[in-house]
Amino acid sequence: MTPENLSTRIKDADDAISEKNYSRATDILLKALEEHPENTKLLSKLGMVSYKLRDFPKAIKYFTKALEISPKDRELVYSLGLVYIKAGDKPKALGLYDRLKKLHPEKADELYRHIYS
């Protein structure tokens, strides 16, 4: 897949997400991921769509994979923390809070507020 095709697929997935057509977005993203399994943007979007669908185990899987590829991405750390909060796993969310403090203290404070709100 050319970079232009990947960009088009991401835009199509974003359009589907905007329309709350999460199953279409998932299909588009999964097809793109087959050809770009290490693409953190695709993994992050799949994590977000899974989160919107309340499929927390899948969201955790996609965000975790993205973080393995890009361990210092503060948005990924934050997003995974939010998923753990919604999944009811505050200890893991707190672990990500500690990690995020080193990357972006302000974002870490925001995550902390979500953990205890």
Image (cartoon, rainbow, N blue to C red):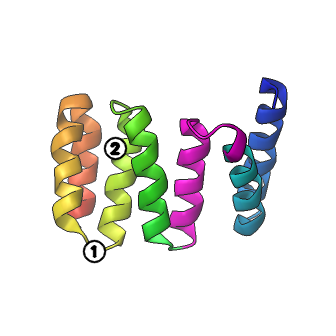
Residue 46 lies in quadrant? bottom right
> Where is the C terminus found, in terms of image quarters?
bottom left
Examine the residues drawn in magenta and state their main secondary structure.
helix
Q: Position of residue 45 (x, y in %)?
A: 59, 49
Q: Earlier in the sequence, mark 2 or mark 1?
A: 2
Tag 1's secondary structure? Answer: loop
Mark linked to residue 77: 2
Q: Amino acid at mark 2?
A: Val
Can residue 83 be seen by looking at this rendering?
Answer: yes
Name which residue lies at 15% across and 44% down.
98
Q: What is the tally of numbered marks visible in this picture? A: 2
Q: 116 or 76: which is nearer to us? A: 76
Residue range in magenta is: 34-53
Mark linked to residue 26: none
Distance of label 2 from label 1 (alpha carbons):
17 Å
* Relative side of 48 to 102, left or right: right
The outermost residue toward the top is 3
Residue at image mark 1 = 88
Name which residue lies at 46% across and 42% down.
66
Instruction: Look at the picture and state if 24 lies above or below 7.
Output: below
